Image (cartoon, helix red, strand yellow):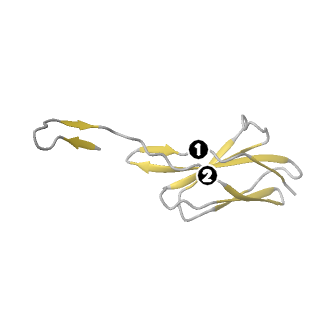
Amino acid sequence: MTITGKGGYKGAVVKYFKILPAKQKIKAVTPLTRSFAVAWTKDSGVTGYQVMYGTKSDLSDGKSTYVTKNTSVKKTIKGLKAKKTYYVKVRSYKKVGNSKYYGAWSATQKVKTK
């Protein structure tokens, strides 16, 4: 943003702002056989979404996967162990040039695979 003086005022001030994507919300987590599906709210102003999942509630053992289309609002995580509890969270990101700007993580949800 640039602010320029008008009339008898001279000079200009330039300020830069990072506007991050909004916090994501998980709509549903569905248990499946050795997998689960997670669905979240759509944000048309972002580039994509990052989904993190793991077996510890703090996701310290978490793995990440990316959904690179902002029109996709569901991801199935496959190749998991049966009858095991997993935790999942989602956040959106906006790609500008070579940089990715991330929004806040959703609340963590718990799911037990079939």
Residue furthest to the bottom in view is 71
* Residue under the image location 57 percent in, 53 percent down: 49
Which mark is first along the chain, 1 or 2? 2
Q: Are marks 2 and 1 in contact (CB under 8 Å)?
A: yes
Q: Crowdedness of circle 1 by 10 Å Cα count: few (<14), some, many (20+)? A: some
* Residue under the image location 72 percent in, 34 percent down: 60
- Whether residue 67 is situated above or below residue 98 in the rendered picture: below
Q: SS for tag 1?
A: loop
Give the label on residue 114, or none. none
The percent position of residue 38, horizontal first and vertical second, equals 71, 58
Q: Nearest the camera: 2 or 37?
A: 2
- Whether residue 75 is situated above or below residue 16 in the rendered picture: below
- Whether residue 34 is situated above or below residue 2 in the rendered picture: below
The quadrant where residue 12 appears: top left
Residue bearing mark 2: 24
- Whether residue 41 is situated above or below residue 1 in the rendered picture: below
**Quadrant location, the N terminus:** top left
The percent position of residue 15, horizontal first and vertical second, equals 31, 38
Residue furthest to the left in view is 8
The percent position of residue 25, horizontal first and vertical second, equals 65, 54
On the rendered structure, is 6 left or right of 57?
left
Q: Crowdedness of circle 2 by 10 Å Cα count: few (<14), some, many (20+)? A: many
Residue bearing mark 1: 104
Q: SS for tag 2?
A: loop
The quadrant where residue 74 appears: bottom right
Residue type, mark 1 in image: Ala
Residue type, mark 2 in image: Gln
The percent position of residue 43, horizontal first and vertical second, equals 54, 59
